[in-house]
Amino acid sequence: MKSLFLRLLVSLWLAMALLVGLFAVIHGWAFASEPGALRRRLGTRTLELRAERAVLCARDGLSGCEQVLAPLDVRDQRVAVYRAGELAMGEPIEGALNVAERAREAADHIAVEVVADREVTAVVLRRDPSLVAVGTSPVRSPWMFFIMPDTLPQRLIAIVGVTGLVAVLLARYLSRPIRVLRGATQQMAAGDLSVRVSQRLTGADGETLALGRDMDRMAERIEELLETQRRLLRDVSHELRSPLARLNIALELVRRRSPPDVEPAFDRIERETDRLNGMIGELLTLSRLESGRGMERTERVDLTALVEQIVEDAAFEAEQQGCSVELGARDACALDGNEELLRRAIENVLRNAVRFTEPGTAVRVDLECQGGLAELRVRDRGPGVPEGALADIFKPFYRVDDHRARGAGGTGIGLAITQRAVLLHGGEVEARNAEGGGLLVTLRLPG
């Protein structure tokens, strides 16, 4: 039993049930006469005494005898006296004659019956067997089953029911701070560092409230550090853009004045500066996505047409590397989102697959749309990824194998951009090694 709520519930329930049961045993409640039968005898005796008093009052010629039969309050019995099937005193009671007849036939001269949502009791008077006292009172409330149970099984059920209800309420109250803290940690794990818990822990004890404040301070500190890191990354990327632009201009000027034999060196410098410029652009994109921006403008995107365009472009690039890209299933899919972000996300996955697939093989792309969910699968025929690194490949600059990754090109940021873009669209992305070799990356996007 790992749930704190269940442990609290069972512990409190057993403790209270044992305590109430012990209290009942100590006071002789569990072994006394049946309280329901005792109440009925007392009620019957009271009914009989009131009827006899009214009859004696009438015989003595006193006034106000009818008041003896009148109910004292809404819960009290209304009493009437019958003789030989005729009303002798009081007001008529519905069903009284039938109940009175059964009382005469009963061995103890008592009969009880529910008539029209009322409990009718009849008893033959001991002083004058020709008279039958009939009383009516409200039917016993079902809640009385828990307050004053009649039999031992009913008492046991009442103990279990009442203590169980109290235990549930107490367990929920005691475990609520833990649920609040758990919900906050789940939000933090999902990337929402703005969550604060101390304000939601109203009524919590001092230790739990202190823990909530500590969690708030921790979240604030982590949020500050991450924001500082993002700002530094963004500022550095912006600052590098200008020197790179000047470097490209200077490179072009020097190239025009240089002899042809140094042209390969200039080409190499140009490729490296272009690669660095592309990396800076991806860093800025990643920084924007991590800050939650990028979804300011959304539109209805034809995902099928978008995937077909990307596959067509990637197929041209794949030809240069001796492989191919084939589009399998292509359901008609459309969703609300940012087309440019979706293009970047899908392109990064597909180009990564083309980069690592073996020459002479094909990268397989499938798009299916079912139940309002679009699922895009991209499978290559490359070396795959170690099982322990499947979740890490979506981290910025993570490389499974530095030599292999640098030889294949790329900046190490593409899959990180893919994950952030998909998350901003409310979807998810996962990678796993496919059967028969290669890596299978799946993007799921709500329609």
Image (tube, rainbow, N blue to C red):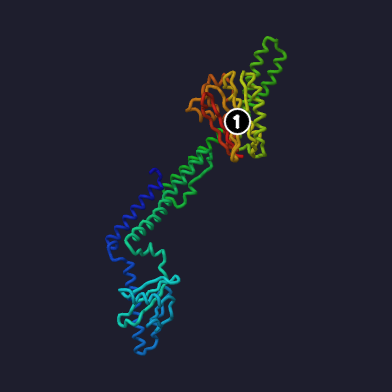
Is there any visible trace of residue 235 in the rendered image?
no
Q: Report the residue at 32% width, 61% height from top.
A: 152
Closer-to-camera residue (8/380)? 380
| Position of residue 176 measured from the top left corner of the image (x, y, whole percent) | 44, 49
Quadrant where the C terminus is found in the figure: top right
Q: Report the residue at 65% width, 33% height from top.
A: 304
Taking the view exactly as shown, the residue that stands out farthest to the front is 105
Q: Report the residue at 35% width, 86% height from top.
A: 57
In the picture shown, does residue 165 fall above or below 124?
above
Quadrant where the N terminus is found in the figure: top left
Closer-to-camera residue (40/295)? 40
Amino acid type at circle 1 is Asp
Question: Residue 71 falls in which quadrant of the image?
Answer: bottom left
Q: Is residue 346 left or right of 400 when viewed as pictured?
A: right
Closer-to-camera residue (312/401)? 312
Closer-to-camera residue (173/347)? 347
In the picture shown, does residue 224 fall above or below 36?
above
In the picture shown, does residue 399 fall above or below 97?
above
Label 1 environment density (alpha carbons within 10 Å; few <14, some 14–19, many ≥20): some
Question: Residue 342 falls in which quadrant of the image?
Answer: top right
Taking the view exactly as shown, the residue that stands out farthest to the right is 256
Residue at mark 1: 366
Is there any visible trace of residue 35 in the rendered image?
yes
The local secondary structure at tag 1 comes to strand
| Position of residue 115 measured from the top left corner of the image (x, y, whole percent) | 43, 72
